[in-house]
Image (tube, coloured by chain):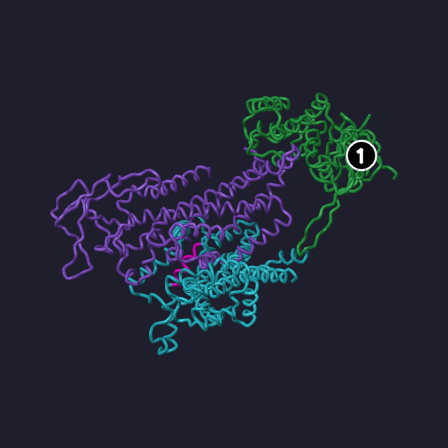
Chain colours: A purple, B green, C cyan
């Protein structure tokens, strides 16, 4: 049953999103807190058995120590094992955006545990990836929501009222569809002020995505509305004296829900990627706010590419989400197709 | 006696748009005139493409006519504005050919049947439910099935729901556009009998559209034969079947098994 | 024939519309962007004034647009403030580099995808096809950015291929064969990134189109006539599955200029991508507009090419088009 599949993928995606939403709890440190004495540290290894061969019940790690004769190469200081504490108290944050909290899943006192290494300013990459995910995913989700709202509105107007409105709107959609959308997004970004606050940049990205991406959903929704308009149950409702508002709300718009959901599953990962691309190139979310895109920006330097492989990890973070959304989109597509067949057959359960 | 419905010289033209801006005009109806008296049934027959469904939509005021006039119970429906139209609508209702298309498959039978009441703002929620159950029972659907979605019923049952829904606003005129054509033979007979019973009980007037002359003769008091948008023959059922005057009628009779043998006798034009 | 003419006219009108749209977007730029140029010490104020009057940047939008259209007629496409040259020649050079990359990648991708797609459509369900399915599914979930960066890191650490640019130092001194080899080495990485990201989609579409055709009765009849399998697959099945594939090919052609934007930037390939980025950061707006228009031309041309090919390949379309 395609419905079961959809549910499974929703659960998977829900879990992934929950992980990111709880960035405050899962991340041990503040994402913008710098430590200029320890730039580009490799991921700290967590041990259970120490250098003397003794087993510790609590996982521990070694602090960084400069290698002899070097001033930027670090190694483990095996003389002093530092224990990790679970449910430790750490930097303040707001759980889910509004509950002030101080407890983190794990933390350390003093020396920091860089689970995924540190960046050029000594900030903890693990924490930054978690927080960055919040921004990148939110851009994708909100961008998709606005795009679909715009597309659904325009598509419904065009399909339901027809006539010159329909022709005009569809010509406009054709225009937007003719443009390579990444180019258009870039061009749009080009014409807006380059240096803005992170919040403004976030809004610009979302608005930009909606401006560029409304055309395809609009066309799809229009198709659904056109065919729904011709269904006899709409005619019958008119026969009972229903006005346009009633028809739209009760009969036409519900028909568009499945195509909108499928489009959502397709657009969200695309938009997250678009935000990542923009931020990677310096056109999106600016420092110090982390986003998966600007976390990768340092890879544009050759030295980083060669020596610091862990700076690539933010790129990998998006992959499970792409898998989840693609799975959801496929399952929704199958469900949509199955529904169409059922309607054609006259809805007979046999 | 005054006719309940009178049509005078109705014409309906459609514009079909082709590529590169060319448009073709399709004349679906031309010069159609007839009258229907209360509590009678007018059967409209004809080959496909003869304009029967277009006529149904025009008489039901679901499509505007290009020219001509229609009177219903003394009021000229072709001259009404939207507000006045809304007041008339409860009196003229339609049952469509394909119940899979005329019933929203996601809705329950109860919701479907009470939709007209909701739109016309009659009764409160509780009373509407009761009305809904009564309507369903009248067409032979038990209360227990009322919450099932339309998709879960058989073809014949769906058409019963459609009929029940059409009766919700207590119409005087019911237009049945090939309402039995999509059903199996045995089910057709059942629903046809239901329609006759309802007509007797409620004093309804029917316009019955069909391509099946036998069904038309069975249900209709008068028969109108259509071809290419015009009425080519109009008379009582007996006259049309026993003494057809137009070629089209004769052809229809020949194609219809089980009608009076007189139809097979060749007629001089 | 009239149908094709109609589509051509539609395409041209579309380009006009696109140019107006992009110009409209440029009005979002706050203030007069020449003001930002003033901050750049390399551009003298005399140049600025000359530019201002020539491009009528103080005048309202329709006049600016008309002036820009005029410059298109002269083959200039506006003026680049950063490079101090008309936009068109700048775009041509970069576009040539981009096309070098994308044409190679597209040909390679199709050359790989066609046999893979046809072959996997035939052997549905058996394990080699399952393995291919897995491989394409994995590639599909890896976004372009991740793929490009990943390849870059691999190359940098292994040193197999040069990690950027189009030519090594001392390129001019190489023999023709040496030049060709140097170019190939530089192209290898970006082409690989492009092919790997395009391959799974192509294979999927080809497999779906061919699989649908393989179930058709006419193919079984042909097999019963004893036609050898390879001929069956490629001469019969592929031809019948051609329609969606031609549309796909048209799309491939359409994205020749725009699909490699990211890969070029990441791998420092001197194509349209890096030019566009530079232009954005330097607020060189005519270059941005010109770049967008250039790649749109290709997109529209690609669609038109698909229409043309479909018209030629599928007699049904000719009949329908002729009847109108």
Residue at image mark 1: B34
| Mark 1 burial class by Cα count in 10 Å: few <14, some 14-19, many 20+ | some
Residue A108 shown left or right of residue C252 in the figure: left
Q: Nearer the viewer, residue A317 or C215?
A: A317
Q: Is residue A161 above or below residue B261?
A: below
Q: Residue drawn 25% across and 54% down? A: A122
Q: Nearer the viewer, residue A28 or A34?
A: A34
Name the secondary structure under disc 1: strand
Q: Is residue C96 above or below residue A305?
A: below
Q: Chain of mark 1?
A: B
Residue C198 lies within the magenta run? yes
Q: Residue drawn 70% across and 54% down? A: B22
Q: Nearer the viewer, residue A205 or C167?
A: A205
Query: Where residue C6 appears, x then y in whole percent?
Result: 63, 60
Residue C307 lies within the magenta run? no
State whether the magenta stretch is mostly helix, strand or loop.
helix
Q: Is residue A333 above or below residue B195?
A: below
What range is drawn magenta here? C190-200
Any part of residue C226 in sight: no
């Amino acid at each position: 049953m395609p419905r079961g599949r959809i549910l499974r993928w929703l659960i998977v995606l829900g879990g992934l999103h929950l992980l990111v939403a709880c960035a405050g709890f899962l991340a041990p440190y503040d994402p913008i807190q710098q430590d200029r004495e320890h730039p580009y540290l490799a991921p700290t290894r967590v041990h259970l058995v120490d250098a003397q061969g003794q087993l510790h019940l609590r996982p521990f790690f070694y602090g960084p120590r400069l290698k002899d004769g070097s001033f930027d190469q670090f190694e483990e200081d095996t003389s002093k094992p530092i224990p990790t504490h679970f449910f430790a108290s750490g930097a303040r944050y707001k759980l889910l955006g509004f509950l002030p909290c101080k407890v983190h899943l794990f933390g350390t006192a003093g020396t920091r545990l860089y689970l995924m290494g540190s960046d050029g300013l000594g900030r903890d990459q693990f924490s930054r990836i978690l927080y960055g995910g919040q921004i990148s995913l939110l851009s994708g989700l909100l961008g998709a929501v606005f795009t679909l709202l715009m597309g659904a509105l325009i598509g419904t107007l065009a399909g339901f009222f027809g006539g010159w409105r329909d022709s005009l709107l569809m010509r406009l959609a054709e225009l937007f569809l003719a443009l390579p959308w990444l180019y258009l997004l870039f061009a749009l970004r080009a014409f807006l002020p380059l240096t803005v606050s992170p919040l403004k940049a976030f809004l610009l990205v979302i608005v930009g995505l909606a401006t560029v991406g409304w055309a395809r959903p609009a066309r799809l929704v229009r198709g659904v509305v056109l065919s729904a308009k011709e269904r006899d149950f709409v005619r019958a409702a008119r026969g009972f004296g229903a006005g346009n508002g009633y028809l739209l709300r009760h009969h036409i718009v519900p028909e568009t829900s499945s195509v909108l959901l499928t489009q959502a599953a397709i657009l969200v990962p695309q938009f997250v990627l678009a935000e990542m691309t923009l931020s990677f190139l310096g056109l999106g979310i600016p420092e110090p706010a982390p986003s998966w895109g600007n976390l990768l920006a340092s890879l544009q330097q050759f030295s980083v590419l060669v020596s610091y492989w862990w700076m690539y990890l933010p790129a990998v973070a998006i992959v499970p989400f792409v898998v989840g959304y693609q799975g959801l989109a496929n399952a929704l597509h199958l469900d949509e197709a199955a529904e169409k067949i059922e309607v054609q057959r006259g809805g007979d359960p046999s | 006696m005054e006719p309940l419905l009178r049509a005078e010289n109705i014409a309906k033209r459609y514009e079909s748009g082709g590529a590169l801006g060319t448009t073709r005009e399709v004349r679906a109806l031309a010069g159609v005139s007839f009258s229907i008296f209360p509590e009678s049934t007018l059967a409209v027959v004809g080959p496909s493409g003869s304009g029967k469904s277009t006529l149904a939509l025009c008489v039901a005021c679901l499509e505007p006519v290009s020219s001509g006039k229609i009177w219903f119970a003394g009021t000229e429906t072709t001259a009404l504005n939207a507000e006045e139209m809304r007041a008339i609508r409860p009196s003229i209702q339609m049952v469509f050919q394909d119940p899979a298309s005329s019933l929203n498959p996601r809705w329950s039978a109860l919701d479907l049947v009470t939709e007209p009441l909701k739109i016309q703002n009659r009764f409160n929620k509780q009373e509407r439910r009761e009305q809904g159950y009564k309507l369903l029972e009248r067409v032979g659907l038990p209360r227990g099935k009322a919450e099932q979605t339309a998709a879960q019923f058989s073809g014949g049952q769906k058409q019963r729901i459609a009929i029940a829904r059409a009766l919700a606003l207590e119409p005087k005129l019911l237009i049945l556009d090939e309402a039995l054509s999509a059903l199996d033979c045995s089910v057709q007979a059942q629903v046809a009998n239901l329609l006759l019973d309802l007509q007797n009980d409620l004093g309804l007037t029917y316009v019955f559209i069909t391509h099946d002359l036998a069904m038309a003769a069975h249900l209709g008091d008068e028969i109108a034969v259509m071809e290419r948008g015009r009425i080519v023959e109009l008379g009582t059922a007996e006259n049309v079947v026993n003494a057809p005057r137009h070629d089209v009628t004769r052809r229809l009779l020949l194609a219809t098994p089980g009608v009076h043998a007189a139809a097979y006798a060749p007629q001089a034009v | 024939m009239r149908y094709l003419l109609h589509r051509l006219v539609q395409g041209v009108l579309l380009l006009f519309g696109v140019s107006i749209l992009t110009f409209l977007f440029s009005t979002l730029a706050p203030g007069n962007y020449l003001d930002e140029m003033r901050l750049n010490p390399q551009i003298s104020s005399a140049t600025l004034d000359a530019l201002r009057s020539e491009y009528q940047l103080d005048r309202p939008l329709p006049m600016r647009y008309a002036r820009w259209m005029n410059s298109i007629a002269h083959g200039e496409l506006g003026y680049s403030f950063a490079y101090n040259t008309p936009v068109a020649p700048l775009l041509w050079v970069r576009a040539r580099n981009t096309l070098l990359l994308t044409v190679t990648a597209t040909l390679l991708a199709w050359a790989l995808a066609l046999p893979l797609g046809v072959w996997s459509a035939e052997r549905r369900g058996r394990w080699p096809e399952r393995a291919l399915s897995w491989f394409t599914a994995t590639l599909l979930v890896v976004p372009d950015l991740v793929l490009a960066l990943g390849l870059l890191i691999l190359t940098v650490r292994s040193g197999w291929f040069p990690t950027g640019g189009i030519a090594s130092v001392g390129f001019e001194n190489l023999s023709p064969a040496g030049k060709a080899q140097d170019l190939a080495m530089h192209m290898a990485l970006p082409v690989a990134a492009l092919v790997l990201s395009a391959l799974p989609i192509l294979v999927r579409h080809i497999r779906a189109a061919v699989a649908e055709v393989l179930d058709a009765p006419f193919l079984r009849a042909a097999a019963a006539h004893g036609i050898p399998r390879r001929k069956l697959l490629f001469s019969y099945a592929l031809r019948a599955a051609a329609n969606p594939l031609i549309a796909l090919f048209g799309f491939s052609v359409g994205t020749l200029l725009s699909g490699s934007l990211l890969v070029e930037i990441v791998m420092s390939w001197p194509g349209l991508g890096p030019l566009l980025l530079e232009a954005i950061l330097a607020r060189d707006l005519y270059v941005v507009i010109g770049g967008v228009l250039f790649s749109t031309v290709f997109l529209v041309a690609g669609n038109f090419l698909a229409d043309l090919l479909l018209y030629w390949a599928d007699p049904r379309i000719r009949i329908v088009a002729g009847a109108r």
